[in-house]
Amino acid sequence: MPWLSQTTKNEVVNLICDRIWLAVVQRSLRPGARLKEEELTEIFGTTRARVRQALVLLEQEGLVSLVPNRGACIAEPDIEEARDAFAARLHVEQRLVTRLCQKVSADQIAGLRAHVARERAAHSAGDSEAMIRLSGEFHMLIATLAGGELLQKILRTLTIRTSLITAMYQPKAAQTCGPDEHARIVDAIAARDEARAMAEMSHHMTHLEAELQLSQGTPPVSGLRAALLGHV
């Protein structure tokens, strides 16, 4: 996951971070699941030092909770935090599309459209892993093109947090929004229409939040080895 892997230059640490994040958003690793260091070293064929480095990074991103004398587990955001995370992310994303509308180039628009085309191909192929990766990358691509290191860092953290919240509170039967909403955001940016771009982003984020069932308790956890063996 390129937008997650930029935290460190160590490939093993990046791999551990990416695979745990992917297992969460694909719902094979549930909120509350224990992350045992010894088991992770065996799964990834690495040292405890590397595993600990990855867990610390994931804690900084809000995906993992490190509890003294208990170890690490996947974080369990509550309903109020879920609402706060989506509200905060909406404001950041709207600011980013506004910035991008003011300075976007033809090459940047072409890059965004090419990205949406890859999303469409992944949806047509039923490639869920690619769909998840490309969806997250779309939002970070907008942040990168818009510029502003602070907003990029904030969005990165919020995207990871809302992905965890979605895994926790979205019914399995719910469908992802697909690339169409992303395409409409790109169209508004290409037209340099700030109001329309903000409205499309608002619609997109509201749609994502509306799919959540923010009245249910924590779902059951899955075993660590079973969750990760399919991703290494």
Image (cartoon, rainbow, N blue to C red):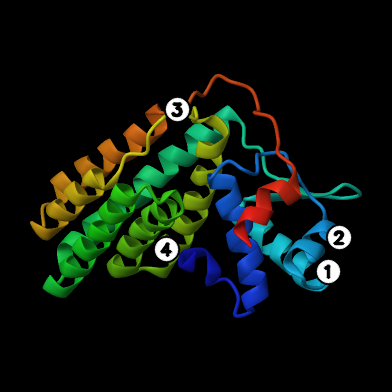
Q: Are marks 4 and 3 in contact (CB under 8 Å)?
A: no
Seen as rendered, the residue at the extreme top is 215
Q: Which of marks 2 and 3 is nearer the N terminus?
A: 2
Q: What residue type is labelled 1?
A: Arg
Seen as rendered, the residue at the extreme bottom is 9
Residue of label 3:
173
Q: Which amino acid does label 4 sit on?
A: Gln
Name the one closer to the observer, 148 or 15. 15
Residue of label 2:
38
Answer above or below: position of 6 versus 93.
Answer: below
Nearer the viewer's eye, disc 1 or disc 3? 3
Q: How far apart are marks 2 and 4 (CA)?
A: 34 Å
Residue of label 1:
48
Mark 1: secondary structure: helix
Res 104 seen here: no
Mark 2: secondary structure: helix
The crowd level at tag 4 (other Cα within 10 Å; few <14, some 14-19, many 20+) is many
Residue of label 4:
152
Q: Where is residue 87? Give x, y as percent.
A: 42, 38
Quarter in which the C terminus is drawn? bottom right
Nearer the viewer's eye, disc 2 or disc 4? 2
Answer above or below: position of 84 versus 123.
Answer: above
The crowd level at tag 2 (other Cα within 10 Å; few <14, some 14-19, many 20+) is few
Q: Are marks 2 and 1 in contact (CB under 8 Å)?
A: yes
